[in-house]
Image: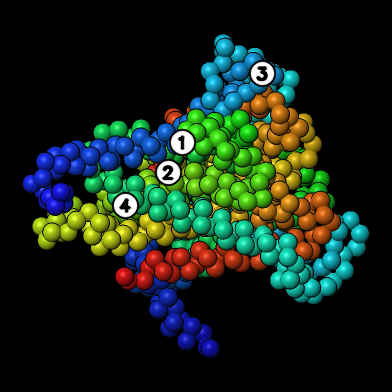
């Protein structure tokens, strides 16, 4: 490409950054254009300087560690002695090891409790409330329903350990209504520990989902509902034909937030069951922690972390794609 | 009996009342589901130490000594201080970095803007589990484990994607004419940001600050791994260890938990509008 060509193509780039006031006066003369160009180069350099304080910590403490995790995933390493290259062996182990597969199943089950259940509950509750209630007290409702979002999950775990305890309110309530026979040490039970932990997740995000859907229904034009009512639509029909389709963006948000929370759950499980009893509540986060910082299997833990990150990224991508497609 | 579904039945007014009550009843049920576990924990914290406990029982008096035991004997005063130090380092620094980057991406002529922005957004789907293993070994190699800068930098790095996304979205909504006018008057990009844009950006900046504070305070996995020294742990990490050690002393554990959540609940109550709008709209713009 000759210099003349380059000069010809230069103005074509201009629309990328349409800022007429900056270059306008300089357009006329040839010399003017040259100073404009060097001024532009300076401005672009300055613009990069603005980005540096964000790019630097992000690259150093998020991106590079992520790449380093990927690197470690190809090695057999106990964290102390020299690592040895094993290729894809760690990934093969993830696919075959029963404990690792159990963790994947549990993460899937947690999606049921962290995403599906809260979204259903939140949606139905929002539909009932938006249809009937006046605006009074909405502020207080939001404040209370968001509370579980605010407190550390460690504290949530302790809160619920106490609810599920032998003498906790759950068993106390069961005994009070004559169902004392059902009382159990919930978090210590092979059958109940996973659903019990899952329901804690439902407790944390249901309020968020409901407030999200409530604010969504307020966006929907009331005239649509009125028109539907004129046509004789009942509340159920209204719900399926108007509320659900028009809340598509809120669905996407609720799904992304809760699916990420389910797949990367660690704090809650660490505090309530630690993965037990046995391996009945083991999730990827717990295994990564155990393998890397207690089990001396840094390579396998890294491979698991890479798979987890990939699954989360794909899930978020798919959710966003689906939400953007026209109904 | 055939008239059950007809609007002329005598049951109709009753059903109308039930319909009108359905909304409030659902709301009250939701709020009770949130608040009852908290009430149970608060009651436990007020019980005398060592008393046999049940989930919902009124204490024979108000035993605040659990709180003072948790604060001093169990060391939660120190733990809280560590958490405050971390938050004080992380929140202002992260807000400033995110604001500068968001401003540049929204209004300045950044080379490779789209790609840089996409690069930053990638971080939104990196879970802590994905970075924590090398963070531990690498920070230990340079002597930054068990230190405030080590943990603070790791948190700032993890918080950048959302912050840049949030501030960019905010600056993109500001009128272009305002920025152009400032440029025509010869204001530098720096002056435009500080004198023209930031004064009217307080809500967006406050929201980001509140979210960052809550995230920093609640962060568990990073301090659990990066801070092994018990004397320097943050409050939630300390609570995690404490649970393993004193799991049986419920009143003490309950009091400690309430102490740890108090600051974040207070910040939330004070800035709740910011917090809620941040979580709702921040997520929606994605």
Circle 3 residue: B51
> Do the residues at discs 3 and 2 belong to one chain?
no
Residue at 56% over, 11% down: B61
Q: A103 left or right of A144?
A: right
Mark 1 or 3 closer to N-term?
A: 1
**Would you place residue B187 above or below residue A107 in this image?**
above
**1 vs 3, front mark:** 3
Q: Position of residue A81 (x, y in %)?
A: 91, 59
Local secondary structure at mark 2:
helix
What residue is at 10 percent from the left and 57 percent from the top?
A230
Instruction: Quadrant for the C terminus of chain A, please.
Output: bottom left
Label 3 with label 2: CB-CB less than 8 Å: no
Q: Are marks 2 and 4 on the same chain?
A: yes
User: How far, Cα to Cα, is label 1 from label 2?
Assistant: 8 Å
Marks 1 & 2, CB-CB < 8 Å contact: yes
Of tags 2 and 4, which is closer to the observer?
Answer: 2
Mark 1 vs mark 3: tell me if same chain. yes
The chain under label 1 reads: B
Q: Are marks 3 and 4 in contact (CB under 8 Å)?
A: no
CA–CA distance between discs 1 and 3? 26 Å
Q: Residues within 10 Å of mark 1 (few under 14, many from 20)?
A: many
Label 2 chain ID: A
Residue matched to label 2: A207
- Please give left or right for residue B211 compared with residue A242 in the image: right
Residue placed most toward the observer, B94 or A166: A166
The numbered dot on residue B34 is 1
């Amino acid at each position: 490409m000759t210099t003349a060509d380059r000069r010809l193509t230069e103005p074509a780039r201009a629309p990328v950054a349409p800022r007429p006031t900056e270059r306008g006066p300089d357009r006329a003369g040839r010399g003017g254009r040259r100073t404009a160009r060097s001024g532009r180069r300076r401005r672009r350099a300055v613009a990069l300087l603005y980005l540096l304080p964000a790019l630097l910590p992000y690259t150093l403490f998020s991106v590079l560690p992520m790449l380093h995790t990927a690197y470690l995933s190809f090695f057999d390493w106990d964290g102390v002695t020299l690592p040895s290259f094993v290729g894809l062996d760690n990934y093969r182990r993830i696919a075959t090891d029963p404990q690792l597969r159990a963790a994947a199943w549990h993460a899937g089950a947690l999606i049921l409790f962290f995403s599906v259940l809260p979204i259903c509950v939140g949606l139905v509750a929002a539909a009932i409330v938006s249809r009937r209630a006046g605006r009074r007290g909405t502020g207080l409702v939001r404040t209370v329903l968001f509370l579980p979002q605010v407190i550390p999950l460690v504290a949530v775990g302790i809160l619920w350990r106490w609810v599920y305890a032998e003498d906790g309110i759950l068993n106390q309530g069961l005994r009070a209504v004559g169902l004392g026979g059902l009382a159990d040490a919930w978090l210590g039970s092979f059958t109940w520990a996973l659903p019990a932990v899952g329901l804690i997740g439902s407790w944390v995000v249901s309020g968020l989902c409901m407030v999200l859907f409530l604010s969504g229904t307020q966006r929907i034009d009331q005239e649509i509902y009125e028109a539907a009512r004129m046509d004789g639509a009942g509340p159920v029909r209204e719900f399926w034909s108007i509320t659900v389709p028009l809340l598509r963006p809120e669905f996407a948000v609720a799904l992304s937030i809760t699916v990420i929370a389910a797949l990367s759950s660690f704090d809650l499980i660490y505090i309530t069951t630690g993965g037990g009893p046995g391996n009945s509540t083991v999730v990827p986060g717990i295994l990564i922690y155990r393998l890397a910082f207690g089990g001396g299997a840094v390579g396998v833990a890294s491979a698991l972390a890479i798979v987890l990150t990939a699954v989360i990224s794909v899930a978020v991508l798919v959710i966003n794609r689906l939400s953007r497609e026209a109904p | 009996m055939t008239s059950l579904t007809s609007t002329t039945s005598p049951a109709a007014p009753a059903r109308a009342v039930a319909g009108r009550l359905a909304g409030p009843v659902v709301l009250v049920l939701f709020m009770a589901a949130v608040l009852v576990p908290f009430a149970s924990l608060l009651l436990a914290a007020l019980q005398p130490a060592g008393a046999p406990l049940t989930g919902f029982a009124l204490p024979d008096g108000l035993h605040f000594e659990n709180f003072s035991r948790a604060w001093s004997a169990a060391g939660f005063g120190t733990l809280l201080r560590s958490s405050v130090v971390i938050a004080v380092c992380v929140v202002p620094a992260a807000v400033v970095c995110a604001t500068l980057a968001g401003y540049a991406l929204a209004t300045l002529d950044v080379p490779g803007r789209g790609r840089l922005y996409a690069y930053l957004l990638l971080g939104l789907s990196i879970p802590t589990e994905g970075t924590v293993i090398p963070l531990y070994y690498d920070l230990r190699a340079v002597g930054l484990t068990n230190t405030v800068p080590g943990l603070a930098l790791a948190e700032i790095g993890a918080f950048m994607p959302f912050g840049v996304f949030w501030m960019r979205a905010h600056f993109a909504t500001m009128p272009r004419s305002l920025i152009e006018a400032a440029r025509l008057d010869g204001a530098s990009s720096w002056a435009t940001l500080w004198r023209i844009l930031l004064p009217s950006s307080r809500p967006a900046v406050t929201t980001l600050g509140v979210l960052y504070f809550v995230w920093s305070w609640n962060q568990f996995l990073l301090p659990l791994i990066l801070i092994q020294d018990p004397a320097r742990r943050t409050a939630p990490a300390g609570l995690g260890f404490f649970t393993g050690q004193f799991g049986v002393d419920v009143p003490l554990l309950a009091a400690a938990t309430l102490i740890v959540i108090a600051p974040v609940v207070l910040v939330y109550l004070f800035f709740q509008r910011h917090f809620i709008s941040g979580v709702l709209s921040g997520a929606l713009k994605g």
